[in-house]
Image (spheres, helix red, strand yellow):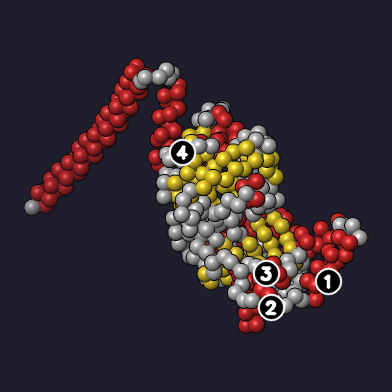
Amino acid sequence: MNNFFKALGFFSVLTLGILSVSNAKTDEAKRVEALEKLTKTIAVVEKYYVDDINFTQIVDKTISGLMSNLDAHSSFLDDKAFKDLQIQTSGEFGGLGIQVGIKDGALTVIAPIDDTPAYRAGIKSGDVILRIDGESTIGITIDEAVNKMRGKPKTPITITIVRKGEKKPFDIQIIRDLIKTESVIAKQIPSEEMLYLRVSNFDQHVTQKAKEFINKNKNAKGIILDLRNNPGGLLNQAVGLTNLFVDKGNIVSQKGKTKGEDEVFKADPSKKVTNLPLCVLVNGGSASASEIVSGALQDLKRGVVVGENTFGKGSVQVIMPINEKEGLRLTVAKYYLPSGRTIQAVGVKPDVVVYPGKVPGDDENFSIKESDLKLHLENELGKIENKNTKDEEKDEKSIITDKQIYEDIQLKTAIDAIKIIIAKG
């Protein structure tokens, strides 16, 4: 009987070995068959396609089609796109000042960048771009769209918008300009003794600038971190900004197909700079790095998140050169917040959901506080005396008035949330 089981065991191992080799051969045969199909397709296109097209162009289109069919963020970077990519995080480039993505198959505005042509023209987060200069965007890739929208400063472009709440598409003409981004702006809220930090994108200066502003305002009672319409940027800056507020725990982790893409980013206790009460503002234009910061602060119980559900871009793209002039933007991993939840296609749900608009009330009976009245009278006096001084302009850029607060119910809610945190001790 023992010999029978030994024989059966040997036979099982032998069978498994044969099946393994057989499966390997089958897999290899399938790869060869697939490559033959691709080669034949390219040959047929090269020989019979109605327009002249060379072999290199066919291969480029093949690669482009492959990448765009993987997901909305992977793409083939040709010579021009590869060069354009190098200037996107430099803080200065030509175009409209708009961040776009593919959502539900449509070219969608993630967010306009503050104080840019797109922002001033009234482009909003969630707008669907139906046409660019009369050409349909159906089936367009992100890189193709960006290339169409970029151009020489002072040249016009017309984009056709589909907006929620509007009965039909409408055109907006925008004049291209040199885009200079100020990634971090700090303002004081004198009436509440709070610091307002506006982070419009995550370039390489965010963590350092935010740290400087926080250290200059240590007497503030609380901090409002505004990440609304922030389309994201550099991962290390998202981690760095979060670390200014926390001293322990995982900030974010990424998990991919290979272990080499797995990484956990932990808080460094030495980099925390403040314990002040914190509120984070987000909306549908808050994406990627913004979602990492808001989600991590939420999971780590460090800040209250106020506003609307975020965009839902939680995947990691890397640039892989395929030669000196071209490359691939490939999704290799997904982000996971400290609690283990994903951002991808879900976003971050605020602790307090508030839709944009003014604070309800009778505007005519709105009481102007002494500080606002003084500023208003000084401005009027300046007009009479023809005295628009630089100091007055500086004041307007460095503070948020009560009137501005009551025009932004999300901001007002964030202020009230900090007051509650302070009251609870």
Note whether residue 234 is visible: no
Along the line of sight, the residue nearer the viewer: 181 or 149: 149
For marks 2 and 4, the one nearer the N-term is 4
Residue at position x 52%, y 69% in the image: 353
For marks 4 and 1, the one nearer the N-term is 4
Residue 101 point in image, percent of width and height: 50, 47
Disc 4, SS? strand
- Real-space CA distance between mark 1 and mark 3, rounded to the nearest whole angstrom: 17 Å
- Real-space CA distance between mark 2 and mark 4, rounded to the nearest whole angstrom: 49 Å
For marks 2 and 1, the one nearer the N-term is 2
For marks 2 and 3, the one nearer the N-term is 2
Residue at position x 62%, y 79% in the image: 420
- Real-space CA distance between mark 2 and mark 1, rounded to the nearest whole angstrom: 18 Å
Mark 3 neighbour class, 10 Å CA radius: few under 14, some 14 to 19, many 20 or more: some
What residue is shown with label 4?
136
Location of residue 172 by image quarter: top right
What residue is shown with label 3?
405
Along the line of sight, the residue nearer the viewer: 370 or 347: 370
Residue 58 point in image, percent of width and height: 41, 24
Residue 351 point in image, percent of width and height: 52, 71
Disc 1, SS? helix
- Closer mark to the observer between disc 2 and disc 4: 2
Residue 343 point in image, percent of width and height: 47, 58
- Real-space CA distance between mark 4 and mark 3, rounded to the nearest whole angstrom: 40 Å
- Closer mark to the observer between disc 2 and disc 1: 2
Disc 2, SS? helix
Along the line of sight, the residue nearer the viewer: 333 or 363: 363
- Name the amino acid, label 4: Ser
Location of residue 413 by image quarter: bottom right
What residue is shown with label 1?
374
Picture disc at residue 365:
2
Task: Give above or below for 202 relative to 67.
Answer: below
